[in-house]
Image (tube, coloured by chain):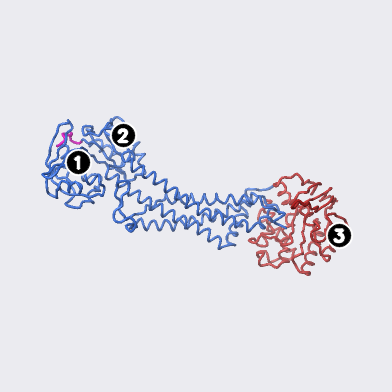
Chain colours: A red, B blue
Amino acid sequence: MAEIVKLTGINKDYGRNNVIVHALKDVNFCLQSGDFAAVFGPSGSGKTTLLNLIGGLDKPTRGVVEVDGIVLNKLSMTRLSLLRRDRIGFIFQSYNLVPVFTAMENAEYILMLQGVYKSKRRKIVGKLLEEVGLGGMENRFPRELSGGQQQRVAIARAIAAAPAIVLADEPTANVDSDTAAGIMKLLQRLNQEKNITFLYSSHDKNVIRYAERLFQLKDGQLEEK
Amino acid sequence: MFKWKRSLFDMQPQIAWRSLRRNLRRTAITVSAVSLGLAFAVFYTAMHAGVNKQLIEQGIRFYGGHIILEHPQYRHAPSVDLFIADAEKLMSKIQKSSSSISASRTIINYGMARTAYASDGILIKGIEPTSNGESPFSKLIVSGRFIDRERGSNICMGKKLSELLRLGVGQKFVLTTNDITGTLTEGLCRVEGIFETGIEEIDSRLVLAPIGYLEDLLMMPSGGANQIAVLLDDPGKQSKVIRQISTLLADESINLYSWKEVLPELASYLRVDQAANLIFQGILFFIILFTIFNAILMSVNERNREFAVLLAVGTPPLRLRWQLLLEAFYIGIAGCLIGLIIGGMVSYIFQIKGLNASFVYGNEMSISGLSVSPLIHAHVTWDLLAGLGGAMLVLVVLVSFVPMLRISRISLMETLR
């Protein structure tokens, strides 16, 4: 299987008021294509920092980040932006949908950025929304959807462009436990049926139990369980 | 492959439009700021243009025409013997060249008016009373009537001069002057009418006489003149007509002057006034644009998270800037259209009905030595509307550049935390 994510000797330090915080310490990490992996750990353990580094939203203090064979460290803002558009899907804790877009428009946004024709992307996204259980809700705006439904739109947006990996930062933190279970089953199904690589973070034991590979972050150090 | 151009016009115009609709109150306030500011600027400029138009028309009517033709040496040393001998022929040549041009000739000389009670130096103008339409002096007659013939010794004079000479309508005085040979000559004139312009220099010195009378008195060849005044139906075509007449009279030894050269004081006043107007409009536009700048900046700051998410999922910063540019463009278009309609309509009403400014200026208003009616008529033109509307639209779009640049400074890490 191909290596989708490879972190080598990653350190991330934050400096605040002359105090240096070591968020990640000498992290080495590898994800294969089709993995369904979770990073868990208490609040402030560095989960979001790890996902941000993989997603190209942040740069490490030391070490090398590779996604789908591309080294991210020296990429320009524009290159990183294109990499995120084409190879990485994001699912955020608070959904982060564009409020002036309908479910369909939110989900097709990245395809639109890629220059896919409207008719083609509507076909792709219409099918996807059916798959995530939002058939018939294509024209609803985020404010007309529940938290769980909004997160499903976010999932559809993340996978619509068939990225190499989907990064989900606490994807169930803002929904109740039943909805959380529904979302996790959906991610699991998409992983199995479409062979999409997922890496998600959580501190909820009920959520991390879905993962096939489990990583624990503790005091900035990563350990596979 | 990324189809950049198509993509820019794919969803971004919709996002921009819906983003404006999302916060209707803020959008309405911003559009109102643009439209009311522009409406005020249009009204102010139209009223200002109205006053200037009135001034120019008065100046041109009182002192000559849009274009003046003279003997080449006359401007530097005005003397009655420096005349255009075949002025009448030239006038007909000029008038034939365009239907929107009218011309008249004038004989100008200095002299002395004498009665049994007093005498005073005068400026005497021989005019064609019926040429170039109705003379502006005919409307300013306060006693008697305006001269209506090109011959005869009946004249009109300024009110102050008539008071000094103790002359009333129907009474006579002796006019002493020199003819074109330099010989003193005298004539007996009868007062047909007395005018009052409100301009000291005119009311106390000017005598208007039929041109035929002065031709005879001054031994001027028939059809000759010291000045040919050309009036244009469309003053905007002045430069073009000057070129046209210059070509037409290339073989003649005649100098052409625009009204700005003949009335340099008025031209300077208008230039200074125009500069003051531009400064005022600049300040007005600055205030409006500052309001718009704040509104757009606020709208960007409020949507920091939204922009951060869009950047995180792979939206190029240029694309988000494009969205803001479209938002500013929509605001500008809506504000300018409303502003032009309001400003244009109000100005048009005052163009028809006029604004009585006597409550500010009293019943007489004098600018640069010219008396202006306190009933000010606005002068709104398509050029004025297009110029101000276009300038406002461009400036509204330009001020959105600063908030636009902030997008690339959004910290994804901080904002998405």
| Residue type marked 3 | Glu
Query: Which residue is rendered at x = 12% and y = 37% of the image?
Result: B186
Q: Nearer the viewer, residue B383 or A185?
A: B383
Q: Nearer the viewer, mark 2 or mark 1?
A: 1
Q: Which residue is mark 3?
A: A212
Q: Which residue is mark 1?
A: B122
Q: Position of residue A134 (x, y in %)?
A: 71, 65
Q: Position of residue B134 (x, y in %)?
A: 24, 48
> What label sits on residue B248 in the rendered view?
2
Give the chain of mark 3.
Answer: A
What separation in Å lies between label 2 and label 3 (alpha carbons)? Answer: 97 Å
* First to last magenta residue range: B217-223
> Do marks 2 and 1 both belong to one polypeptide chain?
yes
> What label sits on residue B283 in the rendered view?
none
Query: Which residue is rendered at x = 66% and y = 48% of the image?
Result: B3
Q: Nearer the viewer, mark 2 or mark 3?
A: 3
| Residue type marked 1 | Ile
Q: Secondary structure at mark 3?
A: loop
Would residue B407 be counted in the magenta stretch?
Answer: no
Using a 10 Å C-alpha cutoff, classify the residue at mark 1 as few (fewer than 14 neighbours), some (14 to 19) or many (20 or more).
many
Residue B19 appears in the picture as rendered: yes
| Quadrant in the picture for the C terminus of chain B | bottom right
**Pointer 2 and pointer 3: residues touching (CB < 8 Å)?**
no
> Do marks 1 and 3 both belong to one polypeptide chain?
no
